[in-house]
């Protein structure tokens, strides 16, 4: 798979998720509304990454890897773990640190915690460095011909795969809340069909 194919697959995945979830009803309780709002923001970040790659701004797309991960973790935590008091504080702009959220979610496969903990343990340092610049971007802007974006194609494809995984995981939560059983079946079928893009 090359970058053109990876971007095409990513657009198809994002388009399908939006078709299934836009303008859909969810339960009107505070926990659900807060978590769905954050899940929607995760999809916005994922869409933004595609726009940036299409605009030949790979460095800025890479800076969104950490907000993509953190947004997803916050949404899962809000939906499944946060106490009423924590929801009150979150509504006031007070959120526990990422490591606390990951610890509270745990690492059980049933909660999605295994994926969250694995991504966090393996990538958080890189996500942090890419978001805050520094050597992660300096090293990718130097080439033999000058100072210009020089991001490895395989690295871009890997980031798109991570982005796609978050899109489908977000879709799972949204479709479950929306009680769209047919779409959940399609999601499982599409996940197999899109395996090269994940």
Image: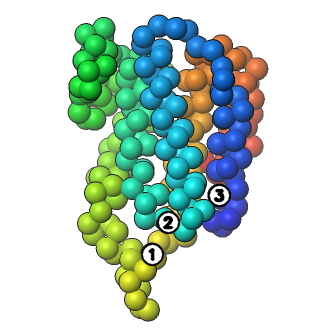
Q: CA distance from mark 1 to mark 2?
A: 8 Å
- Residue 117 percent coordinates (x, y): 36, 36
Residue at position x 32%, y 66% from top?
A: 136
- Name the residue that disc number 2 marks: 57
* Among the two numbered marks 1 and 2 on one chain, the one whose residue lies closer to the N terminus: 2
Residue at position x 42%, y 51% from top?
A: 64
Looking at the image, do the residues carrying marks 1 and 3 touch, with CB atoms under 8 Å apart? no
Secondary element at tag 2: loop
Q: Residue furthest bottom?
A: 145
- Residue 126 percent coordinates (x, y): 33, 56
Looking at the image, do the residues carrying marks 1 and 2 touch, with CB atoms under 8 Å apart? yes
Res. 178 image quadrant: top right
Of residues 148 and 65, the one drawn nearer to the viewer in this rendering = 148
Mark 3 crowd level (few <14, some 14–19, many ≥20, 10 Å Cα): many
Mark 1 crowd level (few <14, some 14–19, many ≥20, 10 Å Cα): some
- Residue 35 percent coordinates (x, y): 45, 22
Residue at position x 71%, y 37% from top?
A: 16
Of residues 68 and 195, the one drawn nearer to the viewer in this rendering = 68
The N terminus lies in quadrant? bottom right
- Name the residue that disc number 1 marks: 149
* Among the two numbered marks 1 and 3 on one chain, the one whose residue lies closer to the N terminus: 3
Please name which of the two marks, 2 or 3, marks the residue nearer to the observer.
2
**168 with respect to 41 (left or right):** right
Secondary element at tag 1: loop
Against 188, residue 118 (above or below) is below
């Amino acid at each position: 798979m090359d970058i053109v194919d990876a971007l095409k697959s990513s657009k198809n995945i994002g388009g399908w998720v939006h078709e299934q979830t836009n303008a859909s009803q969810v339960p009107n309780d505070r926990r659900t509304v807060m978590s769905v709002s954050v899940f929607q923001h995760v999809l916005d970040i994922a869409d933004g990454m595609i726009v940036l790659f299409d605009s030949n701004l790979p460095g800025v797309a890479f800076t969104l890897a950490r907000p993509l991960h953190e947004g997803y973790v916050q949404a899962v935590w809000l939906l499944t773990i946060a106490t009423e008091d924590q929801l009150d504080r979150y509504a006031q702009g007070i959120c526990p640190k990422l490591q606390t959220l990951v610890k509270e979610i745990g690492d059980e496969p049933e909660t999605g915690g295994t994926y969250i903990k694995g991504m966090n343990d393996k990538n958080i340092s890189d996500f942090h460095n890419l978001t805050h610049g520094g050597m992660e971007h300096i090293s990718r802007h130097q080439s033999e011909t000058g100072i210009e974006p020089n991001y490895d194609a395989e690295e871009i494809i890997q980031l798109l795969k991570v982005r796609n995984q978050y899109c489908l995981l977000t879709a799972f939560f949204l479709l479950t809340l929306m009680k769209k059983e047919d779409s959940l079946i399609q999601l499982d079928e599409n996940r197999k069909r899109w395996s090269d893009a994940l």
